[in-house]
Image (cartoon, rainbow, N blue to C red):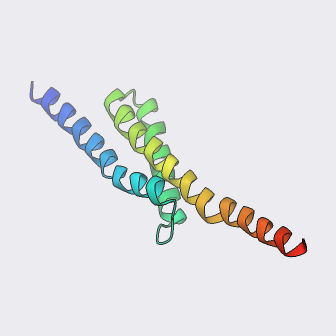
């Protein structure tokens, strides 16, 4: 009985941890500004979560898998938005400016 309570508490804490990333995700989507947000930090989170996903698969721990997968997905979306905002959109804006000067 106590084992099940601890397992579901653990899952709850993993899901709560994933929810802590959601305000950053919403802010990135609303403002489309990633200044002050580190690609390195979120990539580090992704690496750690990827290893935890592999560990949960090897150990057949579905609770750990579900919880960490939620974290992984949210961090992956944040990482993609940061990379798009800082590098892809920036370079596209520079190309537009370059072509405007040529005309």
At horizontal 82% and vertical 70% (from top left) the residue drawn is 100
Please provide percent x and percent y for residue 81.
Answer: 55, 54
Q: Residue at the far front: name it.
A: 103
98 displayed left or right of 4: right
Farthest left residue in view: 1
Depicted 14 relative to depicted 103: above or below: above
Say which of 64 and 77 sits in front.
Answer: 77
Q: Which quadrant is the N terminus positioned in?
A: top left
Q: Nearer the viewer, residue 38 or 63?
A: 38
Q: Residue at the location (44% across, 55% down)?
A: 30
Residue 92 location (% of width, % of height): 74, 62
Question: Is residue 64 placed above or below 42 in the rendered structure?
Answer: above
In front here: 8 or 16? 16
Depth check, front residue: 97 or 79:
97
Identify the residue at the far right of this view.
102
Name the image quarter holding the C terminus. bottom right
Counting the numbered discs, the total is 0
Left or right: residue 63 versus residue 91 is left
Q: What residue is drawn where x is 31% and y is 46%? A: 19
Q: Position of residue 16 (x, y in %)?
A: 26, 45
In-image side of 65 versus 77 (left or right) = left
Farthest bottom residue? 101
Q: Position of residue 13 (x, y in %)?
A: 23, 43
At a point 57% along the width and 51% down the height, the residue shown is 80
Q: Quadrant of residue 60?
A: top left
Say above or below: 12 vs 100. above
């Amino acid at each position: 009985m106590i084992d099940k309570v601890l397992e579901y508490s653990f899952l709850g804490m993993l899901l709560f941890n994933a929810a802590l990333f959601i305000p950053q995700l919403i802010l990135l989507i609303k403002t489309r500004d990633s200044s002050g947000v580190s690609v390195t930090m979120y990539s580090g989170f992704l690496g750690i979560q990827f290893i935890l996903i592999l560990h949960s698969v090897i150990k057949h721990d579905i609770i750990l898998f579900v919880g960490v997968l939620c974290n992984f997905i949210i961090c992956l979306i944040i990482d993609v938005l940061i990379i798009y905002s800082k590098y892809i959109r920036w370079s596209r804006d520079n190309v537009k400016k370059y072509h405007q000067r040529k005309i």
